[in-house]
Amino acid sequence: MSFNNTNGSEEPTPIEGESFTLTPAAVQGHNLQTIRCDNPRDIRPALTACTQEIDKMVQSLADGQKAVFNFGELHSYISHIFTETAFIADLHKKYSDRLMVVHETPHNYIEPNQHPATTFNSFSIARLAPYSKTYLLNYLYSNNIATYFCDLAKKEGKIDLSDSKNRKFIKDHGHLLNRRAPIWLQKFISNNIPYEPPAVFIRNAFMTYMAFEQARENQHDILVFLTGSAHVFGINQRGKDYPYIQSLSHIQQNSIFTQETITPKISSALAFPQPQEIDGILLSYAKKFNDTVLVLDNLDTSEAFLDLDFVFSLATNIASPEQEALHEIWKASGEEQALGIPEPQLFSEYKERAQQSLTATP
């Protein structure tokens, strides 16, 4: 494990990525650490760094203060989802009922008191890395870990403007949202595509508001947000600007949306395919608003999708490439003894059946 700390006061120049440009902002006094996994499939360096950061935050909490940790993933990356699973397993052992997981999933995905992860039906929210996400959700469910879906309700690929919670939030906070981002609320209502900048801003505010409301109601003071990496600090991606001031990290500091009397402690981890390119990430107000940012370097970049090959693997009981990759990450990271999470289900059975089918006499 290697740590590369950056606490410089100079504003870096913009850094060009293959598919995105990360616009820099002041990083004065900011604790930016790069955590390198020498073996891309061994997640333990990333896992250790994230867990140690939470421990540090929790030890320094004031009475009534919350610790917030944002994990920014790329939704299709198997190693990112698996690192989240092992990270939450670590936290659950230490903090149990204090822990709350906030998942970037529409709040209306399930009815109250139900859970989506009892069967493979949860693939309906997991078109990217479907097996990995189902493994994560099943782990949360089987261990009774408080998990809340706090994103805006969606319908037919758009934000559902008829949903009662969506409407109430916009009604109660619309003037504040409009003050922070003039005309964006109007743009959102007229073009409510979930991944467009106006919608992402309102989703960030909604997720923050809903999560803190649930945390107060259920007395959780350690919140882990699992979202796409662009939500955490904002990004300038493919010509679209997602400003830092409208990001999760910034909004989480605003008592208007958190309703907290004590500003929470916030740290974040970012998993990018090329994290060496994010030294100049959008960190406006970083000195004031973030304890630490961990850049998780060199994690495995295998991707997975809910496609015909995956469906075929389920139908034929032969492990899909995603299942094989997840299993290899599990083994390279020390298996259950090191990770505290069980072997991903069905591998032994799938491999057995696959071998039998290969050796069977025609």
Image: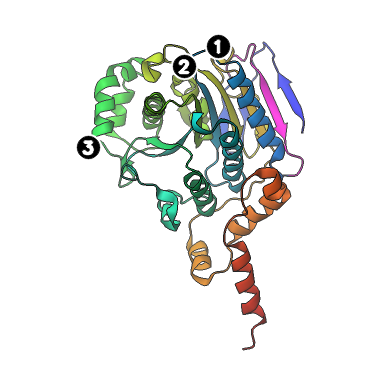
Label 3: few (<14), some (14–19) or many (≥20) C-alpha neighbours in 10 Å? few
Element at label 3: loop
Per the image, the residue denoted by label 3 is 162
Location of mark 2 (residue): 253
Q: Quadrant of residue 269?
A: top right
Q: Position of residue 128 (x, y in %)?
A: 50, 49
Q: Earlier in the sequence, mark 2 or mark 3?
A: 3
In the picture of the structure, the residue carrying the numbered disc 1 is 288
| Quadrant assignment, res 103 | top left
Tell me which segment is drawn in magenta: 25-39
Q: Is residue 46 visible?
A: yes
Q: Name the residue: 67% across, 50% down.
A: 330
Percent across and percent down for residue 106 are 36, 40
> In the image, is 238 to the left or to the right of 294?
left
Choose top left, top right, bottom left or bottom right for residue 286.
top right
Name the residue rendered at 74%, 25% in the picture. Answer: 4
Q: Are marks 1 and 2 in contact (CB under 8 Å)?
A: yes
